[in-house]
Image (cartoon, grey):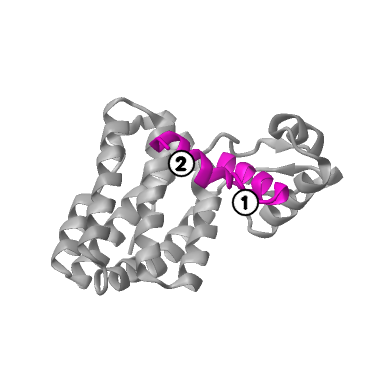
Amino acid sequence: MNLQAEQEKTTTGAGAPAHEQVYRSLRARILFGELEPGQAVTIQGLTEQLNAGMTPVREALRRLTAEGALEFQGNRRICVPVLTATAVDELTIARRALEPELARMAARQVTGDQVAALRDTDRRLDRAIARGDVRGYLEENYRFHAELNAMAEAPILTSLVEGLWLRFGPSLRVVCGLFGTRNLPDMHKDLLIALDSGDSAAAARAMEGDVVQGMCQIRAGLGDSIDIR
């Protein structure tokens, strides 16, 4: 199976029950910004787009609304949330509390093979940046962080972080459109060096820097700066 097919299978949950496939497919559309902030979604529209039945679509909408990736508005309208500056600040606080700690935990037990796999993901990320591939950048950047978080073996913290990424994913896609992939921050190299040496404190610092820079870019896309004190 080639990389693209493997990514598609992982993202959409190919082989999983129908309701899970619909959930993962819609989740990926939100996470990677195919659905824009403020964009409304309907059951009828999604059944056509996803070639799915109404019941699994309803279930997917329910789950993603509960996770904060979608929100109910008036007249049974469901849409992708529009991030406010305050929301970005809150997301930044939460990410700074959780993701550096996951990086610290990963550095304490990561294996050489795991670091090598993470470095391969980072190379694919670099290639996506070089060719201006926004979707490729978003997928590989997410994969890098998801692989690292898995290495920490802290499922509760990882689940919390996954929910945060769903909330800012659509806005990150907008930022890519505004600034281009070449201008996006990348502190992954510092993180990989820290993982190679087993330096948990340096891994946490690198991750915090990556989080702050990324969220600053999103905040800049809203036309404001972020308070990182």
Above or below: residue 121 compared with residue 161:
above
Query: From mark 1 to mark 2, how far is it between C-alphas?
Result: 21 Å
Tell whether position 28 is magenta.
Answer: yes
Q: Which mark is residue 84?
A: none
* Residue placed most toward the observer, 55 or 90: 55
Residue 79 lies, in percent from the top left, at 70, 42
Q: Amino acid at mark 1?
A: Ala
Residue 212: image quadrant is: bottom left
Residue 53 lies, in percent from the top left, at 80, 40
Check the picture and name the quadrant holding the N terminus.
top left
Q: Residue furthest top?
A: 131
Q: Secondary structure at mark 2?
A: helix
* Residue placed most toward the observer, 201 or 196: 196
Which of pointers 1 and 2 indicates the residue nearer the eye?
2
Check the picture and name the quadrant holding the C terminus.
bottom left
Q: Is residue 20 left or right of residue 120?
A: right
Q: Which mark is residue 69?
A: 1
Q: Which residues are magenta?
A: 1-30
Q: Is residue 223 left or right of residue 196?
A: right
Q: Secondary structure at mark 1?
A: loop
Query: Residue shown at 59%/44% (left/top)?
Result: 14
Q: Is residue 29 left or right of residue 121?
A: right
Within-10-Å neighbours for mark 1: few <14, some 14–19, many 20+: many
Q: Residue furthest right?
A: 75
Residue 88 lies, in percent from the top left, at 48, 53
Q: Which mark is residue 7?
A: 2
Query: Residue shown at 25%/40% (left/top)?
Result: 123
